Image (cartoon, helix red, strand yellow):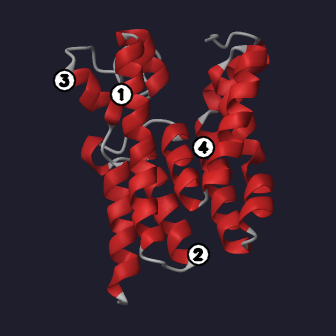
């Protein structure tokens, strides 16, 4: 049983390392998202390159990368430490995928999947924030950044676990830092809209 937490963390990282954007683009005959558009292998860039169907498949795949390993850990009734570590590993896999030269996306959908598996209410609170911001401002990155910034607060209220709040905070910080170019564009008023 001592190997189980480490096996789950490894599974989380390897699952996160599968780039949905690259796989979807290859299967649909679309350009490599790392070389075209914003050069980010994520759903927003795939939307630009291949339309709504390709973007939806990418979003689903990226979300499942967080949902499946964390959900499995949840089913196995592991400790909060292991649950949080698996979530973090899945997001790190997306950010730094071993299968794609450690050049990954920004982690938004994978983090959302992980949050949903940690606690559905946490994922729903995150989603509601994203949708509200998207409806108001029509800027995907601003919506994600706002939802991520509020994640520690939501985790504290919903999970009642300092450990899960801590891991959720680390994930949120990693995703926000990964959006440094979007933050710069937001400050200069050049960020693209939905």
Q: Quadrant of residue 73?
A: bottom left
Q: Report the residue marked by disc 2.
A: 80
Name the secondary structure under disc 4. helix
Q: Residue at x 49, y 21 (%)?
A: 44
Q: Position of residue 128 (x, y in %)?
A: 71, 35
- Residue furthest toward the bottom? 2
Rendered view: 34 above or below 167: above
Mark 3 or 1: the one toward you: 1
Q: Marks 3 and 4, how far apart in space?
A: 27 Å
Classify the position of the C terminus by image quarter.
top right
Q: Marks 2 and 1, how far apart in space?
A: 30 Å
Circle 1 residues within 10 Å: few <14, some 14–19, many ≥20: some
Circle 2 residues within 10 Å: few <14, some 14–19, many ≥20: some
Q: Report the residue marked by disc 1.
A: 57
Which callout, 3 or 1, points at the residue further toward the start of the chain?
3
Q: Quadrant of residue 145?
A: top right
Q: Marks 4 and 1, how far apart in space?
A: 21 Å
Q: Report the residue marked by disc 3.
A: 27
Q: Position of residue 164 (x, y in %)?
A: 65, 67
Which callout, 3 or 4, points at the residue further toward the start of the chain?
3
Rendered view: 132 above or below 193: below
Q: Report the residue marked by disc 4.
A: 175
Q: Are marks 3 and 1 in contact (CB under 8 Å)?
A: no
Q: Are marks 4 and 1 in contact (CB under 8 Å)?
A: no
Q: Marks 4 and 2, how far apart in space?
A: 21 Å
Circle 4 residues within 10 Å: few <14, some 14–19, many ≥20: many
């Amino acid at each position: 049983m001592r190997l189980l937490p480490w096996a789950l963390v490894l599974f989380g990282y390897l699952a996160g390392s599968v780039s949905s954007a690259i796989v979807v683009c290859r299967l649909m005959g679309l350009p490599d998202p790392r070389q075209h558009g914003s050069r980010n292998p994520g759903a927003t860039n795939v939307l630009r390159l291949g339309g709504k169907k390709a973007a939806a498949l990418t979003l689903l795949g990226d979300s499942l990368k967080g949902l499946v390993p964390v959900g499995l850990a949840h089913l196995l009734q592991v400790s909060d430490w292991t649950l949080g570590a698996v979530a973090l590993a899945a997001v790190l896999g997306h950010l730094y995928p071993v299968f794609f030269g450690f050049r990954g996306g920004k982690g938004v959908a994978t983090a959302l999947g992980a949050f949903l598996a940690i606690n559905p209410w946490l994922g729903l609170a995150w989603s509601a924030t994203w949708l509200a911001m998207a409806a108001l401002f029509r800027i995907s990155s601003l919506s994600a950044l706002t939802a991520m910034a509020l994640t520690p607060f939501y985790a504290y209220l919903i999970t009642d676990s300092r450990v899960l709040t801590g891991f959720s905070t680390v994930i949120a910080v990693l995703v926000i830092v990964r959006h440094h170019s979007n933050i710069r564009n937001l400050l200069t008023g050049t960020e693209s809209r939905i």
